[in-house]
Amino acid sequence: MLRYHRWLKITFFFIIIVGVFGLFWFLKTTVKDGNSKKSFETKIILDTKELNVSNFSTYKVLTLSGEVPITSSILYLSNEESDIVTVVNEIDRPILMGRKFKGDTNVELSLKSSAYMMVLMHPIFNGKISDNPKELQRRIQEHPKFYLIILKIKMAINKGSLDPLDPIMNYDAFNIVEELVSTLKIDDLYTGENE
């Protein structure tokens, strides 16, 4: 019986030591530069410097896992499969949108990312999955008309539009999206059943 208690104490002590070392290793690998950066989080960067929005603190970030109030220009959200992150206003209409690609740990929500998402809302992309989404993004963002979409979205937000990414509410931007899509070469980025 005495040996059993001794074995139990040694086992318990071993479990405590392993737990302490495991916690130390976890903290060492997830804390960098004094900021907690956990491997199961996605860093959301809100680029709002060009926007004239006084009530940004009333907005929230939406993902598949729910909503998070905006407390600063950098937020950490749980990592998830969702590839779309959205900032919505007080009436739950999208103001900024961004896309998280597989393996990304940062998502920037900006006028540029929102213009890209507005292009992807075009019916030509409905039901399609690109074989190379980063190349698709590059082609869209390097298109000569892309910057004009950014400007139209910026103007709509700064004029107080409640729905700057809606094709009906921001008809000028959507007309430019139509022009961009009509000249965009993407056939090589789609193969198989999703065509």
Image: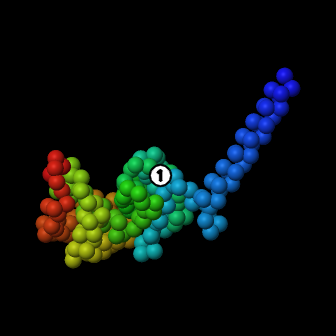
Q: Quadrant of the N terminus?
A: top right
Is residue 123 visible in this depiction of the protein?
no
Percent coordinates x, y for residue 77 in the rendering: 51, 54
Residue 35 locus on image (x, y percent): 62, 64
Q: Residue at x 28, y 69 (%)?
A: 138
Residue under pointer 1: 79
Count of marks, rendered view: 1
Q: Nearer the viewer, residue 1 or 23?
A: 1
Q: Is residue 183 left or right of residue 41?
A: left
Give the vertical position of 80 relative to 146 (above or below). Answer: above
Residue pictured at 78% horizontal, 31% vertical = 8
Location of residue 31 by image quarter:
bottom right
Q: Residue furthest front?
A: 3
Q: Amino acid at mark 1?
A: Asn
Q: Residue at x 39, y 68 (%)?
A: 110
| Quadrant of the image occupied by residue 189 | bottom left
Q: Splitting the image into 4 quarters, where does residue 161 fall?
A: bottom left
Would you say 3 lies left or right of 59 here?
right
Q: Secondary structure at mark 1?
A: loop
Residue farthest to the right?
2
Local crowd at mark 1 within 10 Å, few (<14), some, or many (≥20)? Answer: some
- Name the residue furthest top: 1
Identify the residue shown where x is 38% and y is 56%: 102
